[in-house]
Amino acid sequence: MITALVQIKLPAPARREEVVAAFEASAPNYRGTPGLLRKYYLFDGVDRVGGFYLWRDRESAAAVHTPAWLKQVGERYGSIADISYFEVPVVVDNGAEQDQDKGTD
């Protein structure tokens, strides 16, 4: 698995309602995306937004995070996105473990 951390510094502080509306508008674009396991939308509460993506592999991430995608994101948010990719060699998923524990009474 691969994660991608996308961070975007907004040109000015933003209200949470505006940021959430923008996220909700873009979420359908990612539903059903090949290789995308999960996406978390990020907001620091002031002027930084982004996404944390969990991809099946690097090729799937590269198929979405293209130069055209970067341009589109930059135009939408008024700033260039910074992307960092990481291999995921170990996962701790407490939510999944708790779900499994519910069935062990």
Image (cartoon, helix red, strand yellow):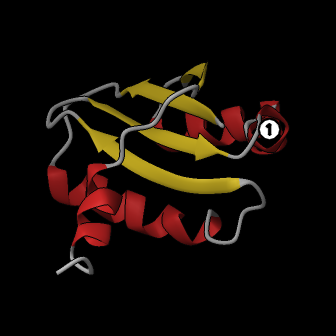
Q: Nearer the viewer, residue 99 or 82?
A: 99
Q: Which residue is drawn at 52% across and 55% down?
A: 38
Horizontal arrangement in the rendering, residue 46 relative to residue 68 (left or right):
left
Horizontal arrangement in the rendering, residue 10 relative to residue 18 (left or right):
right
Q: Which residue is drawn at 41% across and 36% down?
A: 50
Image x and y of residue 9, in percent: 37, 23
Image x and y of residue 96, in percent: 35, 61
Q: Mark 1 points at which residue?
A: 68
**The image quarter in which residue 85 lies:** top right
Image x and y of residue 58, in percent: 78, 32
Q: Is mark 1 on a helix, strand or loop?
A: helix
Q: Which of 41 and 73 is in front in this view?
A: 41
Q: Residue at x 56, y 44 (%)?
A: 54
Image x and y of residue 95, in percent: 27, 58
- What is the tally of numbered marks visible in this picture? 1
**The image quarter in which residue 2 lies:** top right
Horizontal arrangement in the rendering, residue 98 relative to residue 28 (left or right):
left
**The image quarter in which residue 47 lies:** top left
Q: Nearer the viewer, residue 24 or 98?
A: 98
What residue type is disc 1 on?
A: Ala
Residue that extends furthest to the front in the rendered view of this protein: 105
The quadrant in which the N terminus is found is top right
Please tell me whether residue 1 is drawn above or below residue 25 in the rendered image. above
Query: Quick one: label 1, few (<14), some, or many (20+) residues within 10 Å?
Result: few
The quadrant in which the C terminus is found is bottom left
Please tell me whether residue 13 is drawn above or below residue 80 in the rendered image. below
Q: Which of 3 and 69 is in front in this view?
A: 3
